[in-house]
Amino acid sequence: MLNNITELAISPRLAKNIRRNVKERVIELILMLAALSAVFTTFAIVAILLYESFGFFETVSLIDFFTDTQWTPLFEDAHYGIMPLIAGTLTTSLVALAVAMPVGTIAAIYLSEFASHKTREITKPILELLVGVPTIAFGYFALLFVTPLLQIIYPDLPGFNMLSAGLVMGVMIVPYIASVAEDAMRAVPMSMREGSYAMGATRFQTALRVVTPAATSGIVAAYILAISRAVGETMVVAVAAGQQPNLTFDPTEGAATITAYIVQVAMGDLPHASIGYQSIFAAGLVLFVMTLAFNIIGYVVRKKFREQY
Amino acid sequence: MQAQDTQSNKKASVLADLEAVRSMIRRHKFNDLVFASIGLVALMIGLLTLLTLFIDLVMDGYPRFNMQFFSDFPSRRAGSAGLLSAWVGSVLVMAVTFLAAVPVGVAAGLYLEEYAPKNWFSDLIEINVSNLAGVPSIIYGLLALGLFVYGLDLGQSILTAGLTLGLLILPTVIVSTREAIRGIPVAIREAAYAVGATKWQVVSDHVVKYSQGGILTGVIIGMSRAIGETAPIITIGALTFIAFLPPSPVTDVAPYLNFEWLSSGFTVLPIQMFNWLSRPDHAFHINAAATGAIIILVTLLMNGTAIYLRYKIRKNIKW
Amino acid sequence: MVNTSTPLKAEAKNLNFYYSNGHLALKSVSMPIYENKITALIGPSGCGKSTFLRCFNRMHDLYPGNKYDGQIVMHPDNTNILADGVDPIEVRMRISMVFQKPNPFPKTIFENVAYGLRVRDEKNNRVVADKVEEALKGASLWNEVKDRLNDLAFNLSGGQQQRLCIARALATDPEIMLFDEPTSALDPIATANIEELMNELRGKLTILVVTHNMQQAARISDYTAYMYLGEMMEYGDTDTIFTRPVRKETEDYITGKFG
């Protein structure tokens, strides 16, 4: 087509323009396809999870899936109740949040309201470094450092337990909460702080009575995103919390989480399209839905606080 | 006289009030101090944990820090097991990840910042990018298992692992590209348009060039995350006991390159560490600790470089 | 010229002020503040009038690197509130402030007004409720909000928010109240309301107000100071300043030839 146009012998300059326009269009198209890869990935995740889970739910009824109290897909006497895995996931996450929420919030208040500019400049990159530490290293730490330490205080604690995994996961999440919550607090306009200081309030009074309430939605968003992160965390729990499904909310016991189960199955050599193979997709679907829900709520809450000022 | 009396009474009462106010302020300031101390501790918990963790790993893994550890294959005997296949695997997987994620991520970032119309379509992409950043990494592993390993029949190969991690770090690359581009003032674009440049000329000659540093920062952070990622690689079924190396990418006969390594089986550093860590024999834990120390060192170095780079860029911005 | 039978409430003496970037924003400013009178500060933008006002409750201490040199003495106790040993918090408890833009807290109307009392550890709810009512009445807001004291303050209109901020400042019985261009962000009706309110406070409270609006200064103040480039050009009775200014610069500014 391009050749035709040039052969029509319209002015060479016009032909050049057309060629240029076509080139521009093609480039834009390529860039757009690259951007669409994000949409494609999301759809692919949903499609794969649904497709493989579909095979799983042909064998297992949804009622059994949500009401059976045992999860033993690889045993002779197979049970497919997801509840023990959800219990393990929630227990480790709750322990983690019990650590991360107070510590993260206090750290955020300190950074935003108390720390000098210089302290902040030094601390924020360190927090970022912490976020970058591979989780497998934290798994080692939980299993071979924290658990033995806890066993000194509490000798009956089993070698695999959710307490130590949860605690370490909590410390891992602190920088995450601290940085999102700090962003929210820094977004509180200075005029509001001035209003408080002008009344004779101290830093602590201002932080507690004015800044924190003003940043509530941002802090809540930080918590929700942290929950999503805790629920999806894999290596710490796979290494330190044990791989035995166990319907309990007692953190001093060992129990498998959804993620730990997926790891356990994937480490073995399961034939493609077997029920065991499909079961990790069903478990993954539950995990995906949980994290997606938290992410969406977090996103909405966060957007709300951004629009507030 | 009377007036003077009331005046001095007033003065006395003001001073008495001030005394009460001052002692209250002292109390309040003590609270400030208490909270500031707690806050500092809260802030340090993470750092102290990281320090303890690193020292713990280095001390536990100390016996294995020698050249042999890097040149030996894994072995049944902990003392002679090494990291050779794991570090070579990590390097090759990272190469694939880099080649997959960087062009696509930068292109996507360029599209979203420079081309995308502000409508539902760009919103859709944007929501997907931010959502993907929050998807647990193990889910990427399931995606790769269904799509790459079985769907596209790429097998449990280096190519599969590289593409999986590529997808995983794509949001990081896209977001950092966008942030870097956003820092470029409109005036520079206008200057280029004013001399007759096309959109692509403006983008490729100016926008990409000036945002290189910022993009690089994001790429390094993404790559360092990919190096330490364990869960998705386990999920696609990486082997843990590999006593061979993939075929070399470079050959001594023309065309000097071969791509067989892409479909080779492999292991990577964090998988090797996980494998050693899950063994009951404590002798292997020493190997795991040494590997952990190495992984942390590498990721800290990479992240540190990225943060330093960003700091330099911010300092050097001239507009 | 200046009424000497009125007691002094405060006095600025040779006040210099440096911002953290080294800029000298106030040059040896001296000025009296008379008790229960309204003193207005006028001058073109950038003349240092807001900077001067913010010295009175040590707002500049919130940002590192700012430096005062000189004195602001409070009467009758003769405390130099800029002295190193004096805690800015103490100063702010004595001198409250109303800002250019209404800045209510993300709290209920009631809790906004009660804020100063809470900060002072007032635990008696009866006392707090009485003070809040009194302050809201003093700020002419009581009738509008008495039925919805537990609503969020953000739901009020801009003018109401500003009166809420005035109530907040009134509730702690300050010795001086500072107003930093309190009507510049408001519409004309809200502005009229605030001016009326200030007229009601006249004679009951020592007020220092910065305004960019000369008519406003003429309407509400007893004394007026004209500042230019960080210097106090002229100070006197409002009537005198507006009718028979001594300096040519003041006259030019007031008549609109400049500024």
Image (cartoon, coloured by chain):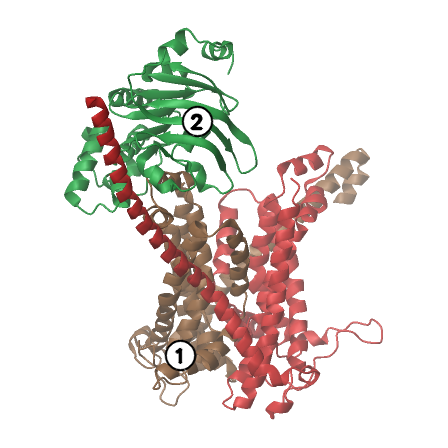
Chain colours: A brown, B red, C green
Host chain of mark 2: C
Q: CA distance from mark 2 to mark 1?
A: 73 Å
**Image point 43% across, 27% down: which residue?**
C13
Q: Position of residue C155 (x, y in %)?
A: 29, 36
Q: Position of residue C183 (x, y in %)?
A: 36, 24
Q: Which residue is mark 1?
A: A256
Query: Is the residue at mark 2 from the same chain as the one at mark 1?
Result: no
Which residue is outermost to the right? B253
Which residue is outermost to the front? B1
Looking at the image, is A200 positioned above or below residue C186?
below
**Image point 27% across, 37% down: which residue?**
B15
Of circles 2 and 1, which is in front? 2
Q: Position of residue A217 (x, y in %)?
A: 36, 50
Mark 1 neighbour density, 10 Å: few (under 14) some (14–19) many (20 or more): many
Q: Quadrant of residue C37?
A: top left
Q: Which residue is mark 2?
A: C13
What amino acid is at disc 2? Lys
Is the residue under label 1 in contact with that under label 2 (CB below 8 Å)?
Answer: no
Looking at the image, is B222 positioned above or below residue A69?
above
What amino acid is at disc 1? Ala
